[in-house]
Amino acid sequence: MIDRRTVLLGALAATLPVAAPARAAIPTNADVVIVGAGAAGIAAARRLVAAGRSVIVVEAGARIGGRCVADTATFGRPCDLGAHALHAAAATPFPALARDLGIALRASEEETLRIGRRRAGDDEIDAFSQGIEGFSQAVQEAGRLGIDVAASEMLPRDLGAVADLVAFAVGPADCGKDLDRVSTLDLARARRGPFHLLAGGYGAFLARLAEGLPIVTGVAVTRIDRRGERVAAETTAGRIEAAAVIVTVATDVLMRGGIRFDPPLPADQEDALAALSLGVQERIVLEIPGNPFRFRDDEDVFFVRPGRRTVRLTANVEGSDLVFADVGGAFAEDLVKAGEAAMVDFAASLLVESFGTEARKKIARSRATAWRKDPRIGGASSCAAPGHGDDRTILRRPVDERVRLAGEATHPTLWGTVGGAFLEGERAADEVISTIRF
């Protein structure tokens, strides 16, 4: 079965302070400039610092973490606004790093379904699971045959009442896009489960990994100049010349020209940025004291209802009073445009459908993300358009010997995950170390 958790995204938040002050002085020279202080940028910096290279990580925002961040202010405890689940743990260095930091991993709960005021019966749960499994098998077969079409063509046609929920679970909830915008070939290659949860949250974990790194926040890189003997990063705080540059910002930022390359990126890489655009996933966080709905800790709940105006709910996060209601795809894009109040109202209305009119009164504080509106990110994880399942290979190719792109979008199988972004940061750093004369 496809694991239905993906990297989620959130708005700017109060975070653990691990980076330099926003207006800190920056050097004019370094061995390597890293653009962006998300998972890939942090991983690349760790690798290069360990190899004895002089490094500067330049982050446009006021915080580190990229699409992995913890809000520490709203609820009086760390609350992941972005990534929350660790995917395919054995394929990443995260379990070992978590042990080194004394951070425990725990398995996530199985999903449950609700239909109106009741929990779904075994037959209904089986129908949902079989629909997911049937879709997964069809996608894998398409991938084996090299068929690269819209993943919506792989949906089983006899799903009955759970048809819309299956489409939501494998599309917007997993990829951030409706399935008619998703490549079967890209999806067939994706590696996800099993997944685990990190004690204290993903945002806090990534912040710990960034401690002590030479990161400057509040400074934007506007141009990568590849014309001279040394490559240069032009920033809002000055020009930095380096032997190499690793660019780890999101595909949508590069696609919009947020960083100019001189000379420009190769045409096929420009095209790949557009084909690997970000999906939309947003999180509505509700504080519901006392567990009035009798959820289990970290329980995943899907709501069976017509259409894709629905959520994936994660209840009692780490045994707390917090409930995550995650939306995705075209509906999430419309909802975030409507604003935070409308987002919270929608999540509350689903609780009313399931638990009665008094449910709305059980909600205390709330917060909703707006990653789609963040100009430094612009959405959730990358997802290849139909016909573009091979574009990650194009994007992963060095721009030239001195400039490389890295992030979840360049990982062939762990795209859409923090682990994939981290591994790609390490990969780019290793390539720089092995090919560049400093």
Image (tube, helix red, strand yellow):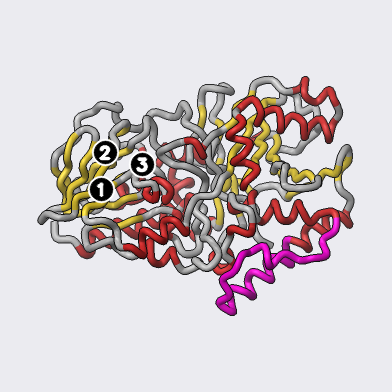
Crowding at mark 1 (Cα within 10 Å: few <14, some 14-19, many 20+): some
Query: Which residue is label 1 attached to?
Result: 49
Name the kind of residue labelled 3 in the image: Ala
Kindly tell me whether residue 340 is visible in this rendering. Answer: yes
The quarter of the picture where the C terminus appears is: bottom left
Check residue 37 in the rendering and tell me which mark sits there, or answer none: 3
Mark before the other along the chain sequence, 3 or 1: 3
Measured from the top left, where is residue 365 in percent x and y?
A: 65, 21
Crowding at mark 2 (Cα within 10 Å: few <14, some 14-19, many 20+): some
Check residue 278 in the rendering and tell me which mark sits there, or answer none: none
> SS class of the residue under badge 1?
helix
Query: Which residue is label 2 attached to?
Result: 214
Measured from the top left, where is residue 314 in percent x and y?
A: 68, 40
* Location of residue 292 with respect to 281 vertically, above or below: above
**On the rendered structure, is 381 left or right of 152?**
left
> SS class of the residue under badge 2?
loop
Magenta stretch encompasses residue 413? no
Name the kind of residue labelled 1 in the image: Val
Mark before the other along the chain sequence, 2 or 1: 1
> SS class of the residue under badge 3?
loop
User: Magenta residues?
Assistant: 132-160
Q: Are marks 2 and 1 in contact (CB under 8 Å)?
A: yes
**On the rendered structure, is 306 left or right of 250?**
right
Q: Residue at x 59, y 69 (%)?
A: 149
